[in-house]
Amino acid sequence: MIILKASWEIDLIRKASRIVAEALAELRKLVQPGITTLELDAFTEAYILKRGAKPAFKGYRGYPYTLCVSVNEEIVHGLPGRRRLQEGDIIGLDLGAIVDGYYGDGALTLPVGGITEEARRLMAVTEQCLKQAILKARVGNHLSDISHAVQSHAESQGYSVVRAFVGHGIGCSLHEEPQVPNFGPKGRGPILKLGMVLAIEPMVNVGSPSVRILDDGWTAVSADGSLSAHFEHTVAITENGAEVLTVMDSNGGGVADAEGEGSSS
Ligand code: MF3
Ligand code: CO
């Protein structure tokens, strides 16, 4: 069952999501060669608590950290640790927060210093996939119109979409129905309705879409070792299209349009 949210509930999801976006904007300033991923995690946990929210991932199915950090061929769910970021890396940062029992979830991929042209293009294409998906998150569309938008854009650029992980409904839980795959034909699945709130999160690989899980039990990497990027927004379906909730307060939480800012910062 897909739970429709009242506007007071969307207000709380918006609060949680803004804290996520603002934390990611702070992290953008910290991501540079030499910093460890554990330092990024510690900063983020302190920031979330200071803002009066709770980390959504810590303790979720036993996940031990606030942040997921996924470097280069890591796709999602990378564990913070003593690894120091190096010039030329790309790092996916995925973060959830809880405010008064309601969840917000967002992710982005950032360059560490100067990066290759391929890495830059992969990040740009993945973010474009998210923007195009958000444009399909409208009352009356089918759920799989979102999925199809991601896949068709990624593949048109020569990349592949990861199938092993999906986006999701979000609200009083981090993961609610429906699942939001990043692939599939359009015109399938439930019709989108006012009050649905979705976390849309394309994961795009340069090479094959196959995934392998490392021995830590969490980190998902591309099976062929190719670079991977991940962007995620929490969006609410309104009368005027999708409202991106994982944006900073100064943005005013704009309604998505063709020129809309897709980034979480
Ligand atoms: N954005 C990811 C998701 O929705 C992050 C979950 S990480 C976990 O699945 F640690 F909480 F599992
Ligand atoms: Co998510």
Image (spheres, rainbow, N blue to C red):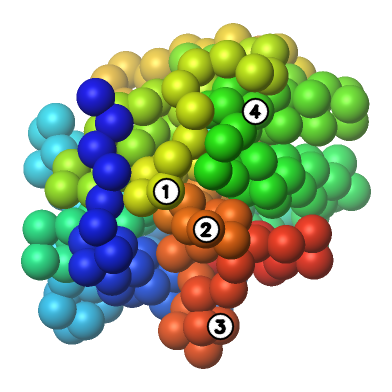
Mark 2 falls on what kind of element? loop
Q: Which residue is mark 2?
A: 239
Q: Is there CB contact under 8 Å for labels 2 and 3?
A: no
The reply to whether callout 2 and callout 1 are in contact (CB within 8 Å) is yes
**Residue placed at 28% from the left, 64% from the top?**
7
Q: Can you give x and y, in whole percent of width and height, for residue 49 in the image?
A: 16, 75
Give the number of the disc on residue 194.
Answer: 1
Q: Residues within 10 Å of mark 1 (few under 14, many from 20)?
A: some
- The residue identified by callout 3 is 251
Give the label, 2 or 4, closer to the camera: 2
Which mark is on residue 64? none
Where on the picture, by quarter, is residue 240? bottom right
Q: Quadrant of the N terminus?
A: top left
List the residue tagged with mark 4.
Answer: 145
Tag 3: residue type?
A: Asn
Q: Picture coordinates of residue 204 (x, y %)?
A: 66, 31
**Amino acid type indicated by mark 2:** Glu
Q: Is residue 257 above or below residue 116?
A: below
Q: Residue at x 29, y 31 (%)?
A: 2
In-image side of 35 versus 56 (left or right): right
Give the mark nearer the N terminus: 2 vs 4. Answer: 4
